């Protein structure tokens, strides 16, 4: 689980004020003045720019984004965001003639996030954007090759017809040029055989200052927050403070590898899956050996480490648990739920419904660090239902899509079997049993006699006790088990910070210094 970009990059108090003013204006606009109706039908005409006709594909999923916020492009708000309220409508279209105007009228076949449709849009001001998702090779709509319109400000105060031109195309990913950076792209024989088509593993590499290709180096494998791609290395390259430190000679001489999170149903979680295929095997048997032959000068696991935050926190801890001899230290921050008795706030083995708790209340999925709920799980899942071409979260490419792909058995029509119903939230007990294979607490309990000795001095976990996504509860459950272990007694370090939220204490520099201390400890032996 990864906190939305808008919350990480913007002062929350400013956004609260901003959202409050928007809400007041929205309510005023919706007043039923002098008995006039306050909801209006919209129709939309969409044309394709002639420059994009050659690359336009006739089959895809059409999205209409309607946002109350003027700052962001509506199409970027695919995560439900309480501060930049954006409603999404979507519809699969099997055949479009791009030379003709696409006419959208009524609400037949459309699925949306709000409780209103395009036939009765509440009065107010919106920022609207159209997206044509035609890239079926990648899992989300923000992928190269997809086409979209510029955002348009509209005022809804009467029935009207809107016109948009699909004239923008998402460009291919590029990594910034730098003498210490390398791009890795490897065809995976294992995944290609599993899927029956060419499948590639990607990563980016940041080499240490004064890199010498004849020397052996420690290596760090970084796993991103949810859906993070290999081109996130650009963020570090554009961070002057970090790069000044990295090339100063003060930074440790460690190779950094930034793994790619993309998988068929969203983030692959770098683990084997009945739905996505053998991503764990491909990582440890294909990608890592390839990278280390090219850049590291050794295949030794003594100085091989893994880290990450959020989804990356779960994956880094999981790789250390499931491949204990492959890595010699995991640095896990704010990991996704690692014990499913506390799958955020759901006990998947006991609860009947994911959306409603045992007291009859809507279950939240996100909160402020003060404890104030911000978003319900029902609304979060409906957002994913709209993003998925199946009209369910099962192939939305987002968080719960990836969880279903990783933890669940195969279901119908090539989709994972859902833990809970996409509309009602009812939990399937048989699927819950299947999820046990990736319940870290149960896995460690079952295998502790063999696993425990291999984990000595290798586990570090940090968690904010007011994690935005209630992930601290699962970490506490796992920690409670570790405190009971014997033969051997666990020496895992699990730290909690009061009133801290999701990933608030994570940074690349901090982890690199932690790895440096781990290396010193190894060298003393």
Image (cartoon, grey):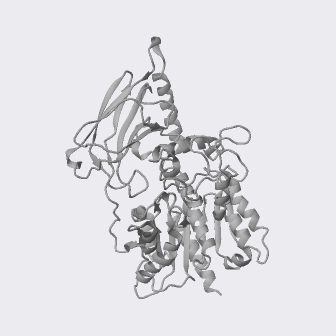
Question: Split into 4 quadrants, where in the image is the C terminus?
Answer: bottom right
Look at the picture and state if 162 lies above or below 284. Answer: above
Location of residue 201 (image quadrant): bottom left
Question: Split into 4 quadrants, where in the image is the N terminus?
Answer: bottom right
Residue 41 visible to an observer of this rendering: yes
Q: Position of residue 357 (x, y in %)?
A: 70, 42
Location of residue 198 (image quadrant): bottom left
Q: Position of residue 146 (x, y in %)?
A: 33, 51
**Residue projecting furthest to the front:** 412
| Viewer-closest of 313 and 267 | 267
Q: Position of residue 314 (x, y in %)?
A: 59, 63
**Residue projecting furthest to the left:** 50
Residue 80 visible to an observer of this rendering: no
| Viewer-closest of 288 and 400 | 400
In-image side of 22 versus 372 (left or right): left
Count the numbered circles shown.
0
In-image side of 448 versus 81 (left or right): right
| Viewer-closest of 313 and 89 | 89
Q: Position of residue 406 (x, y in %)?
A: 56, 60
Look at the picture and state if 87 lies above or below 512. Answer: above
Give the residue drawn at x 68%, y 59%: 339
Look at the picture and state if 55 lies above or below 277. Answer: above
| Viewer-closest of 295 and 251 | 295
Give the residue drawn at x 42%, y 27%: 119
**Residue projecting furthest to the top:** 34
């Amino acid at each position: 689980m990864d906190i939305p970009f808008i919350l990480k990059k913007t002062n929350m108090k400013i956004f609260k004020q901003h959202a409050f003013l928007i809400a007041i204006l929205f309510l005023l606009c919706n007043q039923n003045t002098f008995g006039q109706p306050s909801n209006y039908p919209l129709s939309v005409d969409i044309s394709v720019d002639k420059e994009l006709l050659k690359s336009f594909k006739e089959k895809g999923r059409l999205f209409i984004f309607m946002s109350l916020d003027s700052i962001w492009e509506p199409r970027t708000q695919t995560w439900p965001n309480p501060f930049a309220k954006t409603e999404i409508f979507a519809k699969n279209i099997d055949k479009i003639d791009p030379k003709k105007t696409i006419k959208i009228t009524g609400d037949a076949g459309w699925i949306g996030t709000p409780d209103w449709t395009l036939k009765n849009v509440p009065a107010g001001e919106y920022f609207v954007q159209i997206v044509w998702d035609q890239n079926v090779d990648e899992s989300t709509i923000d992928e190269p090759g997809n086409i979209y319109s510029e955002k348009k400000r509209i005022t809804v105060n009467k029935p009207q017809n809107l016109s948009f031109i699909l004239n923008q195309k998402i460009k291919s990913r590029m990594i910034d040029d730098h003498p210490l950076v390398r791009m890795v792209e490897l065809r995976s024989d294992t995944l290609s055989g599993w899927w029956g088509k060419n499948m590639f593993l990607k990563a980016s590499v940041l080499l240490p200052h004064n890199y010498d290709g004849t020397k052996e180096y420690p290596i760090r494998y970084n796993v991103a927050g949810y859906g993070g791609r290999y081109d996130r290395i650009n963020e570090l390259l554009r961070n002057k403070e970090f790069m000044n430190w990295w090339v100063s000679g003060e930074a440790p001489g460690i190779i950094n590898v930034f793994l790619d999170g993309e998988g068929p149903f969203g983030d692959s979680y770098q683990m084997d899956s009945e739905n996505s295929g053998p991503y764990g095997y491909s990582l440890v048997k294909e990608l890592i050996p390839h990278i280390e032959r090219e850049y590291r000068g050794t295949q030794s696991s003594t100085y091989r480490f893994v880290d990450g935050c959020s989804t990356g926190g779960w994956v880094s801890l999981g790789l250390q648990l499931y491949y204990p001899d492959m890595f010699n230290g995991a640095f896990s921050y704010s990991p996704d739920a690692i014990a499913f008795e506390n799958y955020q706030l759901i006990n998947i083995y006991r609860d009947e419904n994911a959306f409603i708790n045992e007291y009859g209340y809507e279950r939240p999925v996100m909160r402020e660090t003060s404890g104030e709920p911000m978003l319900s799980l029902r609304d979060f899942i409906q957002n994913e239902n709209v993003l998925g071409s199946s009209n369910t979260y099962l192939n939305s490419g987002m968080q719960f899509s990836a969880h279903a792909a990783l933890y669940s058995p195969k279901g119908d029509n090539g989709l994972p079997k859902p833990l809970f119903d996409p509309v009602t939230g009812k939990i399937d007990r048989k699927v819950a049993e299947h999820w046990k294979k990736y319940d870290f607490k149960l896995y460690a309990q079952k295998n502790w006699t063999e696993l425990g000795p291999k984990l000595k001095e290798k586990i570090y976990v940090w968690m904010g006790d007011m994690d935005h996504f209630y992930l601290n509860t699962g970490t506490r459950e796992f920690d409670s088990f570790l405190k009971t272990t014997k033969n051997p007694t666990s020496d895992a370090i699990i730290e909690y910070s009061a009133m801290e939220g999701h990933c608030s204490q994570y940074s690349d520099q901090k982890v690199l210094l932690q790895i440096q201390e781990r290396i010193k400890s190894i060298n003393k032996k």
